[in-house]
Each structure stands twice: as C-alpha cells, then as structure tokens.
Amino acid sequence: MGFYGDHVVPRIVNVACGNKELRQYRDRVCAGLSGEVIEVGFGSGLNVPSYPASIARVTAIEPADLGWRLAADRLAASDVPVERAGLDGQSLPFEDDTFDSAVSTWTLCTIPDAGQALRELRRVLKPGGTLHFVEHGLAPDEGVQTWQHRLEPLNKRIAGGCHLSRPIADLVTGAGFTMKELDEFYAPGAPKPMSAFKIGVAAA
C-alpha cells in the first residue's frame, strides 16, 4: 500500500470515522448480528463497542497492520472475541457456508473490486445468512452525482482509494444477495457528495 496507505490512511480513517455522529449507524447495523460473524474492513475496530452479546465470535478482515494495532484498546474492552484472519476481502481464506452473518461499514467504497468482495462474502455465508451494511455511495440526485464524479479522483488519492459514486445497492444485489431492508438518506452535518448513506440487510 506504500507509506501513506500503511501509516497515514488508517489514522485518518480512525479519526474521521470514529466521531459520535456515526456511532448511531454502527449501533443500528450491528444490532442484528449473531453467531459466527465476518467483518470485512475491520479497520481500527470502531464497530467493536457496537457488537451485541448475540455474537459468538468475529473474524476480522483487515489489510492494515496499523489499523489492527489502533484497535487494541477497543478489543481489550470487549466481551466478544475477535480474531484477525484475513487481509483481502476479495479473496477470503474460508470454506463455503462458514458464517452466520457479515458486516461492512464504510468499506465497499475502498475495496478495489467491491463486486468480487461481495461475491466472496456471499460464498462464505451460510444459506440464509445476512450481510449488514452501512456505506456511502452514489447519490439519488443528479446534481449531487455530478459533484461526486468531480471530487472522486481527489478523494481517492486522499482517502486511500475511497470512491464516492459506487452504486452500493446494485453491487450487493449483483453479487447474488437478496435485499431485505434498505434505507437511503443524506446524513446530516456532512456535504451531500460524501454523505449519501445506504443502510441495509441482504440475505445470501
């Protein structure tokens, strides 16, 4: 990933995605998780305080060693066991039908091939297992979309490859998931090109 990607981006994400306003969305997404859970894009463990007691164990996929180190205090304070067991969401080192649930929070914007990552998640989920996600992506309004396309090249350079205009719902269903719940809205307090949020649950 290079020095910037390895040592700077994880710190930026830890601060930018760790604010109080985003905690409500993490709580909402994690509330439905249970059993054996895989989290792709674990980062610095910002979801850990939102894990419900219904989770038996979390298997974390995270390429950045610094992100994992930044998660140490959150992991130490959690009753839910977490194991780092993969680096690349596009190629998961697990058998088919391994997990009960999966979670992704503001991750699909950055994975180089988000469609492949979603297909991998569907593969390792048990039949009927659920993907719980909150992501930002393509806005519903053309004017905002125009700004997303203008800002995206700069945003990708600053934020470690983060895309602003990915069609999240289409990517999820295109990977073979069945959408069960989907809420799309602009999160208050942030510019619309960056805050077109999608919160959903999809079944494998």
Image: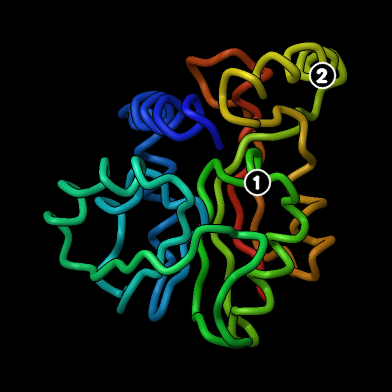
Q: Is residue 47 above or below residue 188?
A: below
Q: Please, what is the three-letter code of the amino acid marked with disc 1?
A: Ile
Q: In which quarter of the image is the C terminus?
A: bottom right
Check disc 2 and report the residue beneath it. 149
Query: Badge 1 local density, few (<14 within 10 Å), some, or many (20+)?
Result: some
Which numbered dot is residue 111? 1
| Colour convention | rainbow
Q: How many labels sit on residues? A: 2
Question: Where residue 151 sits in the image (x, y, percent)?
Answer: 73, 13
Q: Distance between the residues labelled 1 and 2?
A: 18 Å
Q: Is residue 93 left or right of residue 143?
A: left
Q: Which residue is drawn at 54% across and 60% down?
A: 132
Q: In this view, does 38 lie to the left or right of 122?
A: left
Q: Give the crowd class for mark 2: few <14, some 14-19, many >=20 residues within 10 Å.
A: some
Of labels 1 and 2, earlier in sequence is 1
- Front position among marks 1 and 2: 1
Residue type, label 2: His
Residue 155 falls in image quadrant: top right
Residue at left offset 12%, top offset 54%: 77
In the displayed structure, would residue 53 be above or below residue 24? Answer: below
Percent position of residue 45, x then y: 32, 48
Residue drawn at (43%, 72%) of the image:
37
